[in-house]
Image (cartoon, rainbow, N blue to C red):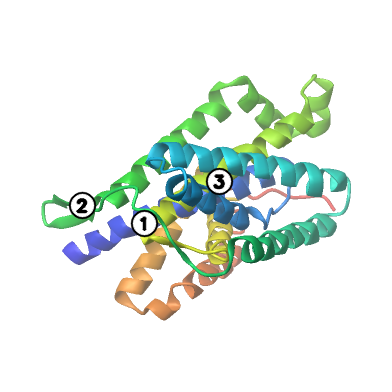
């Protein structure tokens, strides 16, 4: 039982990271019906921004985190403005192919500019073990869960309690009607990309802090797993992305602990297949008929 609870804690810390990345997927999809496959690479850029803030400028954890989030937000807005906005009225397959192209561009730019060798992430939080009864938790896990929780609560506040959040919900419901009501749809979409990218960057810094290494291709598999988490919870739903990320993290850790580490990536896609067969709308989603 102790081992099981220990793995639950490990899974929640990993799932918190997946949830932060999944939120970007689900917000963009909720407004544009676009799967932004470049999102995982924005997470990678955020991790490197945090790395340089800590290694070059010698900033502490919080300033490095905020710097990474700000830099990724600017990148997200640039991607939307340059790559996606001109294709706003194009077919979905065109925007999907563009998203894949942007992803490949960021990955290869990362290899050329940042070099492919893994980097040791600065030790921004000194590792300590915290005992909770029979369980042992390292303080970095607590930092990950705490930061992710704060950011998710802040996101819920922005979406549900602010004017820009109301505008986001209106645009997600009907862009044309929102435009007639005086809402600047382009600005709302840019803000959504900025917000999702900032959350992904926070996840990148937390991953660097926890695992101690980053590289230019680090966004590929976590990006795909976070997309699965968004689908699992109900893509387009912010609470669904949170729940899906946590479930994904716990499932992956349990597979590694009690089966084999070789299955840790396969479990994500097995979950995707099962959820599409059994409940395509996701755990928190509702089935909606779509006219073709």
Q: Is residue 246 visible?
A: no
Query: Label 3 near label 1: C-beta < 8 Å?
Result: no
Q: Which residue corresponds to the image point at 38% horizontal and 53% vertical from the top-left?
A: 122
Q: CA distance from mark 2 to mark 1?
A: 12 Å
Looking at the rendered image, the disc whose residue lies closer to the viewer, 1 or 3, is 1
Quadrant position of residue 190: top right
Residue 41, how many percent across, how many down? 61, 57
Residue 89, how many percent across, how many down? 88, 45
Q: Which mark is residue 128?
A: 2
Q: Nearer the viewer, residue 177 or 108?
A: 108
Q: Residues within 10 Å of mark 3 (few under 14, many from 20)?
A: many
Q: Which residue corresponds to the image point at 69% horizontal and 60% vertical from the top-left?
A: 103
Q: CA distance from mark 3 to mark 2?
A: 30 Å
Q: Residues within 10 Å of mark 2 (few under 14, many from 20)?
A: few
Q: CA distance from mark 1 to mark 3?
A: 20 Å
Q: Compared with residue 36, is residue 254 higher up or lower down, i.e. above or below?
A: below
Tell me the quarter of the image containing the N terminus.
Answer: bottom left
Is 159 positioned to the left or the right of 119 in the image? right
Label located before the other in sequence (3 or 2):
3
Dot 3 falls on a residue whose secondary structure is: helix
Residue 255, how many percent across, how many down? 37, 72
- Label 3: which residue? 23
Is 91 positioned to the left or the right of 18 in the image? right
Q: Which mark is residue 210?
A: 1
Q: Which residue corresponds to the image point at 43% horizontal and 80% vertical from the top-left?
A: 262
Q: Compared with residue 38, is residue 159 higher up or lower down, i.e. above or below?
A: above
């Amino acid at each position: 039982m102790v081992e099981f609870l220990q793995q639950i804690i490990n899974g929640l810390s990993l799932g918190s990271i997946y949830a932060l990345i999944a939120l970007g997927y689900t917000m963009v999809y909720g407004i544009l019906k676009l799967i932004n496959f470049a999102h995982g690479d924005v997470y990678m850029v955020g991790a490197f921004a945090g790395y340089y803030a800590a290694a070059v400028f010698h900033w502490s954890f919080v300033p490095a985190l905020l710097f990474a989030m700000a830099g990724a937000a600017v990148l997200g807005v640039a991607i939307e403005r340059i790559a996606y906005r001109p294709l706003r009225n194009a077919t979905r397959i065109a925007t999907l192919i563009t998203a894949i192209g942007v992803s490949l561009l960021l990955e290869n730019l990362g290899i050329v500019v940042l070099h492919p060798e893994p980097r040791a992430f600065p030790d921004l939080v000194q590792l300590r073990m915290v005992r909770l009864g029979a369980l042992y938790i390292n303080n970095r896990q607590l930092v990950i869960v705490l930061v992710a929780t704060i950011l998710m609560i802040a996101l819920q506040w922005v979406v549900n309690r602010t004017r820009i959040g109301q505008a986001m919900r209106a645009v997600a419901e009907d862009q044309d009607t929102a435009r007639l009501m005086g809402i600047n749809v382009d600005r709302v979409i840019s803000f959504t990309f900025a917000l999702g990218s900032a959350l992904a960057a926070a996840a990148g810094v937390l991953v660097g802090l926890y695992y101690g290494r980053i590289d230019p291709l680090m966004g590929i598999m976590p990006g795909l797993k976070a997309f699965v988490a968004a689908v699992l919870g109900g893509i387009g739903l912010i609470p669904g992305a949170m729940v899906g990320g946590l479930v994904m993290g716990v499932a992956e850790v349990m597979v590694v602990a009690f089966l084999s580490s070789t299955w840790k990536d396969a479990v994500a896609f097995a979950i995707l297949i099962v959820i599409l067969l059994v409940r395509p709308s996701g755990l928190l989603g509702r089935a909606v008929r779509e006219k073709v």
